[in-house]
Image: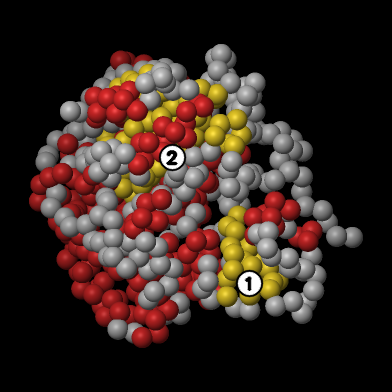
């Protein structure tokens, strides 16, 4: 963090947003009580490349202007210039803490647009990996939040748990981090017996470990007082500002897309939606802890109910055939050639498909003109919308609370900046 | 009464003089109307006790490139009461790129509209804090327009000046 000492360092429009009409502070005067502090884009507590400009009165935050775009890679533009298949690896790089969930969200949007239905087993596998992704993401969120307020041990413990999930993904699809596991019409490969055994083992021992983490910090006075009644947002305001996911449920709104607009087989699953009324950082932390347990419950049911069968739809014009068939059959070779070169050409139309991601509602708005690549692709990223509440939440708090509030919102800049 | 009938009935009742084109594709309702009514329609949909579209999920635009009305602004709104989503669409012509801002109806539209301006150059009137979202303030182009090349425009993003 550094103090801004001259007007040239900040663009005039940002400065205007930071200072309202009644304030008249001279940046150049070192003895002035109010000052403008630049936090980020390179700052460990901003979870990426988020830049904040804070106007401080002593240690109290008077105004805050977030600056986004340091990780803007133009994925929407790129999506317009590549086929639907080619974009799957790029979704890994959106919310890079839960790539599996993004893969699922993307292929679901494309399938809705193209009218493909994945076989039941593939959908069960997708549900399973998205719940694992949710656990992995929440574990990192919990760990990073506690580390931001000074409890380093929990970070190591939750990362140890997360490592086990990454190992499962390693067996499942060969990659620990950027998975690209789903395919349009199904998933890349069936789940291996070793992966299933490892998932079973993981869910058996997980609850004990998350209890252990919670026992360590929930009764810790320093931890609780750093978060209790900090960054409070009411239910009404939370909906106004567009919160979704755990942040909204931390404000007492029972809204979960898995329940509200059931997709895949979530309507057959028995799970609770954790809701806390307080709307402060502590409530958002509790929601995440409880959600990991609910995800474990869902995975248990998935493992019980998972049917046998194909994991990729039989739709030769739209779904890539298996590699072994491409090498041995003429028909499949032609289809493969056509799909790879010209894309899957969904009918003219537009769909908005949203799923409940660990961070909130991840939506893809796709417009097709009947060509191989989408005419328009809009990514509705939860992190960006959640960050919008930051100026509101930090106002009137101490500068050290800013770090806790960012941690409790759990933004991922890869997704916020697209 | 299903969602389409309900929304059609409500809108026709409240705005008899406005032309609404209500279509249903893949079970997703889209309401198209003239852009000058956007604020009225948006606040009605949000405040009506039977509809309550309180959550604005997304605001964006489409560049149709060769059509008569080159752009369209698109809003996705969700009703926590009905558990359903509708899409509002309005055409915007290149000769008049201004649309009234709905940031006072849904606060979340603030950043979405800034992003739409940043990417498509659509001007939102009465916006509380109208700046670019991702690109630098000095940037002159609108990257998601179809006439902006994929590789970018060389020299359009100057490197920071080096102190001598």
Which residue is labeled 1 in the image?
A56
Local crowd size for mark 2, using a 10 Å CA cut-off: few (<14), some (14–19), many (≥20): many
Compare residues A415 and A14 and report the one nearer the observer: A14
Q: Nearer the viewer, residue B19 or A194?
A: B19
Q: Is residue B95 visible?
A: yes
At 40% from the left and 84% from the top, the residue drawn is: A222
Q: How is the image coloured?
A: secondary structure
Q: Position of residue A18 (x, y in %)?
A: 65, 59
Secondary structure of residue under mark 1: strand
The answer, for residue A90, to whether it is visible in the render is no
Q: Real-space Cα distance between discs 2 and 1? A: 32 Å
Please report, as a chain letter, where disc 1 is located.
A
Q: From the image, tell me which residue sits under label 2.
A: B58
- Could you say whether the residue bearing mark 2 is in a helix, strand or loop? strand
Q: Are marks 2 and 1 on the same chain?
A: no
Q: Report whether B148 appears left or right of B6.
A: right
Q: Residue at x 44, y 33 (%)?
A: B40
Instruction: Give the quadrant of residue A314.
Output: top left
Asked which quadrant contains residue A328, the reply is top left
Q: Residue at x 30, y 79 (%)?
A: A218
């Amino acid at each position: 963090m550094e103090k801004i000492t001259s007007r040239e360092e900040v663009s005039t429009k940002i400065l205007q947003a930071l200072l309202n009409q009644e304030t008249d502070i001279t940046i150049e005067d070192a003895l002035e009580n109010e000052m403008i502090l630049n936090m980020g884009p390179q700052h460990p507590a901003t979870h990426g490349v988020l830049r904040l400009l804070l106007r401080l009165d002593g240690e109290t935050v008077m105004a805050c202007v977030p600056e986004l775009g340091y990780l803007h890679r133009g994925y929407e533009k790129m999506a317009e210039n590549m086929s639907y298949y080619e974009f799957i690896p790029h979704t890994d790089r959106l919310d890079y803490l839960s790539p599996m969930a993004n893969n699922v969200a993307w292929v679901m949007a494309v399938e809705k647009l193209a009218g493909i239905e994945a076989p039941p087993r593939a959908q069960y596998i997708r549900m399973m990996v998205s719940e694992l992704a949710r656990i992995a993401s929440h574990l990192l969120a919990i760990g990073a939040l506690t580390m931001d307020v000074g409890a380093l041990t929990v970070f190591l413990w939750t990362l140890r748990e997360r490592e086990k999930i990454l190992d499962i993904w390693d067996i499942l699809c060969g990659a620990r981090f950027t998975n690209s596991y789903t395919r349009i019409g199904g998933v890349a490969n069936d789940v291996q017996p070793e992966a299933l055994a490892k998932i079973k083992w993981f869910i058996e021992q997980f609850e004990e470990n998350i209890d252990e983490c919670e026992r360590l910090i929930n009764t810790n006075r320093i931890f609780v007082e750093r978060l209790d009644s900090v960054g409070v947002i009411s239910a009404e305001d939370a909906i106004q500002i567009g919160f979704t996911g755990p942040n909204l449920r931390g404000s007492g709104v029972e809204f979960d897309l898995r329940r509200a607009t059931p997709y895949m087989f979530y309507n057959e699953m028995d799970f609770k939606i954790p809701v806390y009324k307080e709307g402060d950082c502590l409530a958002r932390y509790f929601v995440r802890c409880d959600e990991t347990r609910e995800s474990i419950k869902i995975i248990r049911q998935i493992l019980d109910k998972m049917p046998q069968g194909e994991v990729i739809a039989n739709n030769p014009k739209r779904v890539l055939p298996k590699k072994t068939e491409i090498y041995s059959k003429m028909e499949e070779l032609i289809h493969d050639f056509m799909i790879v070169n010209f894309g899957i050409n969904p009918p003219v139309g537009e769909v908005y498909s949203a799923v409940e991601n660990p961070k909130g509602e991840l939506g893809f708005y796709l417009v097709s003109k009947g060509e191989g690549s989408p005419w328009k692709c809009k990514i509705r990223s939860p992190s960006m919308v959640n960050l919008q509440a930051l100026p509101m939440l930090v106002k009137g708090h101490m500068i050290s609370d800013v770090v806790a509030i960012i941690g409790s919102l759990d933004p991922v800049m890869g997704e916020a900046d697209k | 009464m299903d969602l389409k009938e309900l929304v059609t009935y409500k809108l026709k009742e409240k705005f008899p003089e406005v032309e609404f084109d209500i279509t249903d594709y893949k079970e997703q309702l889209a309401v198209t109307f003239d852009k000058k009514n956007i604020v009225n329609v948006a606040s009605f949909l949000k405040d009506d006790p039977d509809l309550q579209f309180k959550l604005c999920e997304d605001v964006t635009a489409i560049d149709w490139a060769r059509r008569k009305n080159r752009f369209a602004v698109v809003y996705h709104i969700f009703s926590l009461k009905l558990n359903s989503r509708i899409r509002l669409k309005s055409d915007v012509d290149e000769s008049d790129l201004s649309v009234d801002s709905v940031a006072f109806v849904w606060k979340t539209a603030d950043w979405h509209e800034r992003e739409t301006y940043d990417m498509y150059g659509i001007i939102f009137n009465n916006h509380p804090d109208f700046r670019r979202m991702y690109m630098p303030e000095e940037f002159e182009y609108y990257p998601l327009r179809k006439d902006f090349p994929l590789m970018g425009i060389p020299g359009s993003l100057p490197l920071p000046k080096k102190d001598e």
